[in-house]
Image: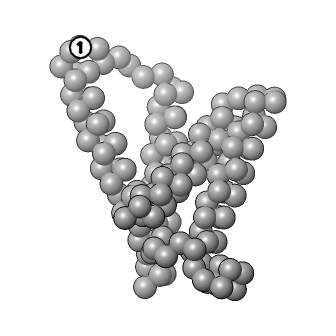
Amino acid sequence: MAIEFLSIVVFTFALALLVLGAITWWMERGRRQTLGVLMMGSALVIAGAYAFLGSRFAIAVFGRLIITVDLPRLMATAVVYTIGVLLGFGLAGGAFLWISGRLIEPTRLERQLVTFIAVVLLVALVISIIAVRISH
């Protein structure tokens, strides 16, 4: 159970770092834009290295699997649960803002940001589903 939890934490951290790096790269200019690229590169290295530990190549290097869980299925489950939690909080937050009268008209940037995040989550879900299908 602990290795599953650790795997979810590592991959969720890498996914969040990748998304936040992309947002930083998109919104910032100059030197800070480079930091966004660095964040995205770090996320890919972290996820790739951790996935390597659960792949057949780890057997060739270390003589055994270091991570012995089904990573594609575990991440598909984690992404589905994360989307479910975010949707639940979003619905409750939207209802709260609507009832309290604090709902304001979003700016163009906010709409684009929400669209970007939704597309990223959709891509992550599709990749996870494809990974689960390939692993069978």
Q: In this orientation, which residue lies closer to the viewer: 57 or 23?
A: 57
Q: In this orientation, which residue lies closer to the viewer: 121 or 7?
A: 7
Q: Is residue 57 visible?
A: no
**Residue drawn at 60 percent across, 83 percent down:** 64
**Residue drawn at 25 percent across, 36 percent down:** 91
Question: Which residue lies under the disc numbered 1?
Answer: 101
The image quadrant where one finds the N terminus is: bottom left
Above/below status of 95 relative to 136: above
Above/below status of 83 relative to 88: below
Q: Is residue 97 visible?
A: yes
Horizontal arrangement in the rendering, residue 13 relative to residue 122 (left or right): right
Circle 1 — which element? loop
Q: In this orientation, which residue lies closer to the viewer: 114 or 55?
A: 55
The image quadrant where one finds the C terminus is: bottom left
Q: Position of residue 33 (x, y in %)?
A: 75, 34
Please state which amino acid type lies under the numbered disc 1.
Gly
Horizontal arrangement in the rendering, residue 99 relative to residue 117 (left or right): left
Above/below status of 47 relative to 36: below
**Residue drawn at 57 percent across, 79 percent down:** 65
**Residue drawn at 41 percent across, 71 percent down:** 73
Q: Position of residue 71 (x, y in %)?
A: 48, 70
Q: Position of residue 134 (x, y in %)?
A: 48, 81
